[in-house]
Image (tube, helix red, strand yellow):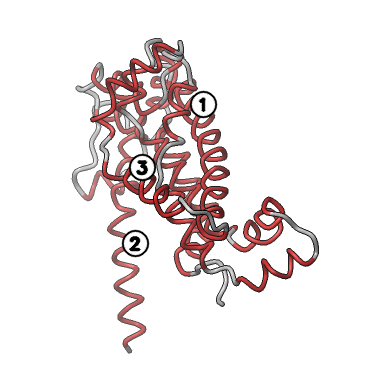
Amino acid sequence: MKRWLLNIAAALLALLFVFPLVWMLLVSLKPDGATVYSLSDWVDWSGLNADNYMKVIRDSQILRWTWNSVVIGFLTTIIAVLFSSLAAFSFSKLPFKTRGIFFVLIASGLLIPTEAILIPLYETALHLKLIDNIWAIILPGLTNPIGILLLKQFMDGVPRDYLEAAQIDGSRSFGLWWRVCLPLTRSAMISVGIFYFILSWNNFLWPYLSITSAENMILSAGLPTFLSNNTMSLNLIMAASAIAAIPTILVFVLLQRHIVQGVSMSGVKG
């Protein structure tokens, strides 16, 4: 009986989260000016069409913005996860005298809000001639220390016996990371990678300041500009929002198994 109650509660919570997405999709497919506020609007599917999506694509550069966001998101994710894994391996498995000091310094990065470093960050990007360049968004995105902190916890769960066996076989530090820690923390790395991708996808303030041309904008910075010019059309707003939500939904649907494994496991059990 208790299991049935938990299942019902989980289903209700799922419906609660899915409801806004379904509403957004229905509004985006309705003719311009139509709403979905009553039950009759929900069940009336006679006028559904993709005209709003075509208008959004025609009147804006949303496909280019989406492509820029995808490229920046994947590059940021791959590089950040790689560097975070190497750093986490060093802090977890390699003894060196200043390990505690450097770990505290990296962890303290979580205490510094992005808004506090915008001016020096902009001056640095301007000096390096990175303004209006995708690397102006990618490089600052690599400095988030959360990946190092999370992956270190997973690296701590890798038994020392595995590393000693690999050392007997002739593996050095890089080989220990590549052959032992990397395979055993794959689920954790995927989970951290999803976090980095979503963080990059939703990044707004710094891309809005560092990108000056419309063709180089990412979706989170370009979409508000389009929405501000179409505040009277809820259908167009929902169509643009649906396009923006599709990539993150796909990432979650395709990789949800790894997200669950990354949360429930700590690499291996020692």
Q: Residue furthest bottom?
A: 1
- The CA distance from mark 2 to mark 1 is 30 Å
Q: How crowded is mark 2: few (under 14 residues within 10 Å), some or many (20 or more)?
A: few
Q: In the displayed structure, would residue 94 be above or below residue 105?
A: below
Q: Earlier in the sequence, mark 2 or mark 1?
A: 2
Up-down relation of residue 104 to residue 214 (above or below): below
- The amino acid type of the residue labelled 1 equals Trp
Q: Residue at the location (69% across, 69% down)?
A: 164
Q: Earlier in the sequence, mark 3 or mark 2?
A: 2
Q: What label sits on residue 45 in the rendered view? A: 3
Residue 45 quadrant? top left
Q: How crowded is mark 3: few (under 14 residues within 10 Å), some or many (20 or more)?
A: few
Crowd around label 1: few <14 · some 14–19 · many ≥20 (10 Å): some
Q: Residue 67 carries which label?
A: 1
| Residue drawn at (75%, 58%) of the image | 171
Secondary structure of the residue carrying numbered label 2 = helix
Q: Viewer-nearest of labels 2 and 1? A: 1
Amino acid on which the number 3 mark rests in the picture: Trp
Quick check: 90 left or right of 210?
Answer: right
Question: Picture coordinates of residue 174 (x, y %)?
Answer: 68, 50
Foreground pick, 247 / 150: 150
- Could you tell me residue 8's position as x and y percent? 32, 74
Q: How far apart are marks 3 and 1 (CA)?
A: 31 Å
Helix, strand, or loop for circle 3? loop
Q: What residue type is labelled 2?
A: Ala
Q: Where is residue 267 in the image (x, y as percent from the top left)?
A: 55, 66
Direction from residue 238 to residue 255 in the image, left or right:
right
Q: Residue at x 47, y 64 (%)?
A: 260
Q: What residue is pinned by disc 2?
A: 14
